Each structure stands twice: as C-alpha cells, then as structure tokens.
Image: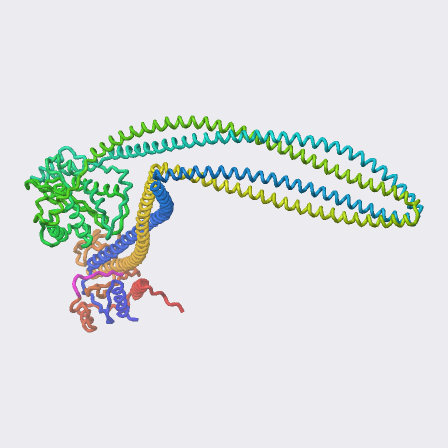
C-alpha cells in the first residue's frame, strides 16, 4: 500500500468518526491548508453532548414521573378496592336490615289484619248491643240455667236407674248362682239314682259283696243325714239373723229417705230465694257495668277533648312580623326582605304541627278518579282558615270565610290540574289557562286562556310528584297542609330579587287585596291526585254577575268553628254529664251492695241446705248400701240354706234308698225285680228334673245377660246426660260472655279501635323503617356501583401508567445508549484533535525552524515566537502540544461534517506517531481538492519532494485506531473463521 492510499483511508475513517459521510475519492495532500481550526468542532460536540444529556435527563424525569404515576395509580387502586370492599359489605349488611324490616312489615300487617277483624267483630257486637238484645241474652241465660237444672235432675234420675239396673244384675247373678247350684245338686241326684239302679241290679243278683256295700252305704247315709241336719239347723239361724238385719236396714233406709225428702224440699225453697237474689244482683251488676261503661266513655271523651285542647294547632307569629310584612307590601326593599327572612326562620323553628287522636282515626283515601270527599275538603279548608285568620286579625284585615262556591271552585281547579296532568315540578308555574277556564265557568273574573300568565286566585304547594291512590289519615293531611302554610308565610322571600317576594304571604294574610275597599275573601283548600295542595282565595268582588255559579253558591256559608271555644264547651258539657253519671254510678253501686248482701245471705242459706242435703243423701246412699248388703247377706244365707236343705233331702232320700237296699236283699225275686224297675223309673224322673234344672240355669244366664245389657244402656244414658250437661254448660258460658260483650260493647269497641290504631301505627312505623332501610340500601348500592366503577377505572389507570412507565424506561434506555455512543465519539474525536494539534505544532515548528535559544522558542531567523514556551528540552505550542525542536511532518487534508477543510497531520518524533485534527472555519473551496499535477506543481514551487515512505508504521497505527473505534461504535466485531 502506498502512502497516498493510507492517508486516504485514514481521512475517511476520521471523517466517519466525526459524523461525516465521505465520497469515494482520494484525499489530496496539501501542505498549505490552514491548520489550528479545532475549536468550532469542540463547541458543536459540547452542544450535542448537552442535548443528549438533556434527553437522558428528560427521559429520566419521564421515568420518575411515570413511576410516581404508577405508585399513585396503585395507591388509588388500593384505596378504591378498600372503598369498594367496604361499600359491598355495607350493601350486604344493609340487605339484612332490609330483610328484617320487611319481615317486621309482614308481621305488622298480619297484626293489623287481626286487629281489624277484631274491630269488625266489636263493631257488630256494638251494633247488636241494644237493650232488647241484652234482655234477650239475659232471658236465654235464665232459660239455659233452667235447662241445666233439668239436665241435673235427669242425670240424678238416670243414676237411680243405673242403681236399679245394677241391683237387677246382682239379683240375676244370684239367680244364676242358685240355678247353677240346683243343677249341680240334681246332677248328684241323677248320679245317686244311677247308683240305685246298679244296687237294685246287684240285689236282684243277690251279690254278697253288694249286700256288704249296701250296709256300708246305709251307715254312710245315716251319718251324712245327721251332719246335714246339723248344718241346716245352723244355717237356719243365720237366715233368721240376716232377716232381722234386713228388716232393720229397711227401716233405717226409710227414715233416711224421709230426711232426704225434707232436705230436698228445704234446698228447693232456698234455691228459689237464691235465684231471686242472684237475678236481682245480676241486674244491679249490669246497672253498675253499664253506668261504669258510660263513665269510662265520658272520661275517654274528656281525655280526647283535653288532648285536643292541649294540641290545638295555631301559628305563632313572631313579634314584628305582621308590621314588617305590611311595610314590605307597601314599600319592598332588600332590608325588609332580610328582616322578614330572619323573622320567618325564627317562626319556622317555633311552629310545629301537633297530632290529633280523633283525626288519626279518620281514614282518607283519594287518587285518580277518587277526589277527596267534600267532608275532608271542608275540614282542611276550616283548618287553614283557623290558622291564618289570627294573622289577618293582627293586621286589621278581613277574616277568611268559607262558602260552598269557594269549596266547589277549589275542587274544580284541582280536577283541572289532574285533567291537564299539570305537575308544578315539571311545569314550573300555575296552570293559568286551566284556572282561568274554571273561573270562567264559575262566573268569576279571569285572564286569557293561556299558559304561564298571571292568575288572581291560587296559591299552590307542590306534591309528591307521583299520581296514584293514597291511603292516609286526616291527621297526616293536616300535617302536610300545616307545613305548606307556614312555609308560604315564613319562607317566601326571593333571594335573587329581594323586592319581589312574599306573594304567598300577601295572599294568605289578606294584604293582597288590602286597599281595594270592602272585599270579603272566601277560601277553598283541595289536594289533587299528584299531592299538590291548592289554596283558592276568591274576593267577593270577583263575580261577573249575580246569577253566576259562584254568586249563587257564595251565599251558602260554611262555619269556621272556634276550636278552643268548641272544645271548651264540649269539655264543660262532658264534665257536667260525668258528674250526673257518677252520681248514678254511686246509686247503682249502693243498690249493688244491698243486692250483694241479700244474695250473700241467700247463697249461704242455699249452701247450708245443699250441705244438709248432701249429708242426708250420703246417708241414704249408705243406708241403701246397707240394705243391699243385708239383702245380699240374707239372699246368700237363704241360698246356702236352700242348698243345705236340698242336700239334706237328697241325703235323706239316699238314706231311705240305702235302707231299702239293705232291706231289699231279704225280699223275694219279684220284689227285687219290682225295686229294679222302680229304680230305673226314678232315674228317668231325676234325669228329667236335671234337664229342667239345666233349662232354669240357661234362663238365669240369659236373664243375667239381659240385666247386664240393660245396665250398660243405663250407663250410656247417664254418659249422654253428662255430655248434654257439658254442652249446656258451655252454651251458658257463651251466653254469659255474649252478655258481658254486649254490656261492655262501647268499651270493647274503643279498645278494638285503639288496637287497630296501634297496629296501624306500628305498621306505618315498620313501613317507614323499611322505606328508610330500603332507601339506604338503594343509596349504598349506587355507592357500591360507583366504587366498583372506580376500581375498574383505577385498574385501567394503573395499566396505562405501567405502559407509560415501560415506554418511558425504553425511551430512557435509548437516550442513555445514544449519550454513551456520543460520549464515545466525543472522546475519540478529542483524542484525534489533540494528536492533530500536536502534528500541526510539529509541522509549524519544523517549517519555521523553531528551536530553543536562551530558554525561548525562536524561529529559523532567531525571532521569538509568540505563544510558544519551553518545557525542559521541548517546546510547547499555544495549543499546549509538546514537540521536539527538530521534527518531520506529513500533512494531508480531510473534510469535516460541515464540508469544511480540516488539516490532518502525521508527526513522527523519535519513532512515536501523533495525530491532530482541527476544523477550519471556512468551507472547502477551490484548491481544497487538488489533482496530481497540481500537487506536484505545488511541491515544486515549495522546493519539496513527495512524502512517500516516511513513517508508514505511524500512519497505519493511527488508521488502525480510527477503524477500530469506528467498528466498535457500530457494533462490528472481528470475524472469526
């Protein structure tokens, strides 16, 4: 490679490092190109470095800001999640509250239904509580008591029948026992007859054994007859004793029964007296109850009247309000408006509706196609007139009146609002067209039939903004009207226009028509199905003619009662009535005490008679049992005696037969045969009698069965009697309860109504609690929906912040990479510049013969060189390049990024090569790039030869450094094979 090619490659590499794209042409050596031009390039590099650092700083700031945004977004997400969790938990908790409230509403509704059913029954009972019905129930009770007495008598008679039937069973059982014994004895007789036949046969056969047996039988029969005779005699004594005992018992029973009859007669007499005194006492008790109920009813009415007196609704007018309102009406001003506003705020604090118990019990239903009744409209109108007339009186103005025309006018205006579906919340003004049309129909003065104009009759209070059927009470309606009225009087200022307010107050107070001469005003108050309250005030001068609808109806006046005077009068009347009734109650109680004492005496006598009767009845029962016992004993003894006598007869017959049997052994054959025949005949006869005895036993058993059946029937009759008595007793209790209900009907009805009112209030409270809880739940759900949306938004914001952070970090990384690359370029450029400056200094020193004389740098002519200094054995250029006094220089030319000429000098000093590059301030012009011929000519004119072989190693070394740096900057590595 020749030197020109090396210099060309070196220039291209350096130009590329400096950021310049160089064309593929030779760079010509030019020793005359100006050197020392490095400073502008350094300034530009510093500016680029600052710009790159600024980009890094900006990117770092963006990363910091993005990281802060991520942290903030995460914090907001955490806060939103916490709030959402709390909101959802609040919704869940409130749902439980709502469910509990709904259960309470359901329970309260059931209680209301039950209470209303009880009230309905109490009302029916009150409707039936006439004197005739009460007397009818009393008669029914008396009849029922007589029936119960008959039931008791029937039971007693049937009990006696049971006793008789039981005795019959006992007698039948005895007959069975007797028949059974006779049958058993007859069986023995038959057996004996059978033995006799056998003996007769044996005797006929003349058996010695039979003869011996016959003698034994005779001995045994003799002994048995002897024993039987003794037993019969003993048993006969027992029968005699039992007979005497029965006779005595019968006598005792007869005496006891006579005593029972006497006791029963005495008891019946005392029962009659006791019944009479009981009836008299019942009458006295009923009188006390009725009178006490009357006293209680009057006391209840007095309590209600007193409650009404204590809770008369009035409007407390603050001191100065009337005068200020009147002054404002005459000359409105902001100061007066402010004063009225303050007085109004005071009035709103000091006025509160007082509930009325009577009004709470008045149910009211109204809605679409079901307007308020005339009665309710009238009561509301009277209520408003009683509230505002005291203010009119204080102002010295005419009192509001009420007539049929003003009531009908208010109702018609209300219905017109409903027809036009005119809701003041939506429309923002009165239904002027509708009001004027109604006024025209009533023959009243009116304006044009157009909307949103003025009208002269109505003050309007907004409603509940929803049409529908309303079930409420007169008390609740008055509460609403009261609140509306005080707001019209005390909260009617216009803050935006303080001189144009208080119009409703003018109207209600009467100032509206003050100064128009004699002018009576009539009021009508009505509520439409949207809950809007219409106050219609009609001046008497507003009629068009005397024959109009209003003019005709206005003469039909409706009284405005003075509640205080009315209630006070009611209280006085009730107090007087209560005094009279209390006197009656005291007389009734005195009579009751007298009747009670007489009844106590008669009842005590009856109790004593009953006790005596019970004693003698118990004695009769005891004597009856004694008779039965003695009779049973006698019957038993007689039966046993009969059995013993029967046994004696049988044994005597056996004895006689045994004797005959013994005697028969001595008889002839004919006699023995005759005896056998006789024995056979006797056997047949006894067997016949056994059949009769068995038949008698069967008949006795049947009679016992019949007696038991009859006893069961009699017991069933008694059981039926007891059931009838129970039913009749229950009926008596029911009648007595009915009588008590009828006698206490007013009190029971009042209590039932109170229960209904209490239940309805509980239901209303439960419904209100449910509504509050449900409204809160709705609000919490809305809040929860908002918090959920906030969480979603926060999540999106966090994702965006993270994306922005990632983008900012990527931009920072790129900026840092760019700064690093620029700093590497600047470092290399600085190194090249320093080497080139040194080469330029060495060239300058060589070309001008700089050397050291007297420790100064002088040129070849010995002149001192300005800016050059001496450092040891070397000289230092103004650019701070250190060179030897004698140097060899090779100079080429390169072009910088701005197209300017840039000297490039290779300097070899003592075998060490340095390079310096400076940037010329002047752009490349002619002679910057030279042809070969021009270059040779230049050398010739300068008496120089081409530099072709010197210091190739230094140039190549610089070239290698430049290329390595360039390849490193662009990420090119050494290729490996």
User: Is residue 811 shown above or below 195?
Assistant: below
Residue drawn at (53%, 42%) of the image: 721
Q: Main secondary structure of the magenta part?
A: loop
Task: Indicate left or right for 687 with 463 as reference.
Answer: right
| Residue 177 position in % (x across, y down) | 71, 42
Q: Nearer the viewer, residue 214 or 726?
A: 214
What stretch of residues is rendered in magenta? 915-923
| Residue 608 position in % (x across, y down) | 51, 27
Q: Quadrant of residue 292?
A: top left
Would residue 920 be counted in the magenta stretch?
A: yes
Q: Residue 824: tell me if it is visible.
A: no
Q: Quadrant of residue 242?
A: top right
User: Is residue 470 shown above or below 747?
Assistant: below
User: Is residue 342 shown above or below 529?
Assistant: above
Single out the residue that lies furthest toward the bottom: 933
Q: Nearer the viewer, residue 624 or 458?
A: 624
Q: Which quadrant of the rendered structure holds the C terminus?
A: bottom left
What sort of colour scheme is used for the picture?
Answer: rainbow
| Residue 831 position in % (x across, y down) | 27, 58
| Residue 687 position in % (x across, y down) | 78, 49
Would residue 798 be counted in the magenta stretch?
A: no
Q: Residue 546: tell me if it is visible.
A: yes
Q: Which quadrant of the rendered structure holds the N terminus?
A: bottom left
């Amino acid at each position: 490679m020749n030197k020109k090619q090396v210099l060309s490659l070196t220039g291209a590499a350096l130009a590329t490092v400096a950021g310049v794209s160089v064309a593929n042409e030779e760079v010509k050596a030019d020793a005359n190109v100006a050197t020392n031009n490095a400073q502008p390039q350094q300034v530009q590099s510093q500016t680029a470095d600052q710009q790159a650092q600024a980009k890094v700083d900006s990117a770092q700031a963006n990363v910091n800001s993005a990281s802060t945004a991520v942290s903030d977004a995460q914090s907001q997400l955490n806060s939103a999640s916490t709030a959402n969790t709390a909101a959802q938990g609040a919704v869940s908790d409130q749902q439980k509250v709502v469910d509990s409230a709904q259960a309470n509403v359901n329970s309260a509704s059931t209680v209301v239904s039950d209470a209303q059913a009880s009230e309905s029954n109490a009302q029916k009972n009150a409707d039936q509580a006439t004197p005739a019905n009460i007397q009818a129930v009393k008669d029914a009770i008396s009849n029922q008591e007589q029936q119960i007495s008959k039931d008791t008598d029937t039971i007693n008679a049937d009990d006696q029948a049971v006793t008789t039937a039981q005795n019959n069973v006992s007698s039948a059982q005895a007959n069975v026992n007797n028949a059974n014994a006779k049958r058993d004895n007859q069986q023995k007789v038959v057996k004996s007859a059978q033995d006799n036949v056998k003996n007769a046969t044996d005797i006929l056969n003349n058996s010695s054994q039979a003869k011996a047996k016959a003698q034994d039988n005779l001995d045994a029969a003799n002994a048995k007859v002897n024993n039987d005779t003794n037993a019969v005699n003993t048993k006969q004594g027992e029968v005699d004793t039992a007979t005497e005992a029965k006779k005595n018992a019968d006598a005792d029973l007869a005496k006891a029964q006579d005593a029972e009859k006497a006791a029963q007669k005495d008891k019946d007499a005392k029962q009659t007296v006791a019944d009479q005194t009981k009836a008299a006492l019942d009458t006295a008790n009923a009188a006390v109850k009725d009178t006490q109920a009357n006293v209680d009813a009057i006391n209840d009415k007095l309590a209600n009247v007193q409650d009404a007196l204590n809770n008369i609704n009035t409007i407390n007018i603050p001191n100065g309000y009337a005068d200020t309102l009147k002054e404002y009406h005459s000359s409105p001003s902001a100061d007066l408006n402010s004063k009225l506003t303050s007085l109004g705020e005071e009035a709103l604090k000091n006025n509160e509706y007082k509930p009325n118990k009577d009004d709470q019990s008045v149910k009211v239903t109204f809605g679409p196609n079901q307007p308020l009744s005339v009665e309710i409209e009238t009561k509301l109108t009277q209520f408003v007139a009683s509230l505002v007339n005291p203010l009119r009186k204080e102002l010295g103005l005419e009192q509001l009146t009420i007539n049929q025309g003003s009531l009908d006018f208010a109702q018609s205006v209300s219905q017109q609002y409903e027809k036009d579906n005119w809701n003041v919340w939506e429309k923002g003004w009165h239904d002027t067209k509708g009001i004027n049309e109604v006024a025209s129909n009533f023959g009243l003065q009116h304006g044009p039939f157009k909307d949103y104009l003025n009208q002269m009759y109505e003050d309007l209070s907004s409603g509940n903004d929803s049409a529908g059927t309303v079930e409420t009470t007169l008390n609740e309606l008055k509460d609403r009207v009261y609140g509306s009225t005080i707001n019209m009087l005390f909260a009617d200022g216009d803050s935006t226009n303080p001189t144009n307010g208080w119009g409703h107050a003018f109207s209600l107070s009467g100032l509206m028509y003050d100064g128009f001469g004699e002018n009576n005003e009539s009021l009508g108050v009505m509520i439409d199905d949207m809950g809007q309250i219409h106050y219609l005030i009609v001046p008497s001068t507003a009629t068009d003619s005397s024959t109009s609808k209003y003019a005709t109806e206005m003469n039909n006046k409706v009284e405005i009662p003075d509640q205080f005077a009315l209630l006070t009068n009611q209280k006085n009347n009730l107090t007087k009535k209560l005094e009279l009734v209390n006197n009656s109650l005291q007389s009734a109680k005195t009579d009751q005490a007298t009747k009670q004492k007489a009844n106590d005496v008669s009842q005590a006598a009856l109790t004593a008679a009953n006790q005596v009767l019970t004693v003698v009845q118990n004695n009769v029962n005891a004597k009856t049992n004694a008779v039965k016992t003695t009779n049973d004993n006698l019957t038993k003894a007689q039966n046993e005696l009969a059995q013993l006598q029967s046994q004696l007869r049988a044994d005597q017959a056996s004895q006689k037969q045994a004797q005959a049997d013994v005697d028969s052994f001595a008889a002839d054959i004919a006699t023995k045969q005759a005896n056998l025949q006789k024995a056979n005949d006797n056997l047949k006869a006894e067997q016949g009698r056994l059949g009769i005895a068995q038949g008698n036993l069967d008949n006795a058993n049947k009679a016992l069965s019949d007696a038991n059946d009859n006893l069961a029937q009699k017991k069933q009759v008694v059981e039926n009697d007891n059931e009838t008595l129970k039913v009749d007793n229950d009926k008596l209790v029911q009648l007595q309860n009915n009588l008590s209900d009828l006698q206490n009907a007013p009190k029971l009805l009042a209590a039932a109504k109170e229960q209904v009112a209490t239940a309805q209030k509980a239901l209303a409270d439960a419904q209100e609690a449910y509504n509050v809880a449900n409204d809160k739940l709705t609000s919490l759900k809305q809040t929860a929906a908002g918090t959920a949306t906030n969480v979603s938004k926060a999540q999106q914001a966090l994702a965006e912040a993270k994306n922005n952070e990632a983008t900012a970090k990527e931009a920072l990384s790129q900026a840092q990479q760019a700064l690093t690359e620029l700093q590497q370029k600047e470092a290399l450029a600085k190194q090249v510049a320093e080497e080139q400056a040194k080469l330029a200094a060495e060239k300058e020193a060589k070309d001008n013969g700089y050397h050291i004389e007297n420790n100064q740098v002088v040129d070849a002519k010995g002149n001192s060189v300005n800016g050059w200094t001496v450092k040891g054995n070397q000289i230092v250029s103004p650019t701070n390049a250190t060179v030897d006094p004698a140097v060899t220089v090779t100079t080429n030319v390169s072009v910088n990024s701005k197209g300017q000429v840039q000297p490039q000098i290779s300097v070899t000093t003592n075998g060490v090569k340095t390079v310096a590059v400076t940037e010329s301030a002047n752009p490349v012009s002619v002679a910057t790039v030279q042809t070969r011929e021009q270059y040779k000519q230049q050398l010739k004119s300068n008496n120089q030869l081409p530099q072709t072989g010197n210091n190739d190693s230094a140039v190549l070394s610089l070239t290698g450094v430049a290329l390595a740096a360039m390849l490193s900057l662009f990420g090119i590595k050494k290729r490996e094979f």
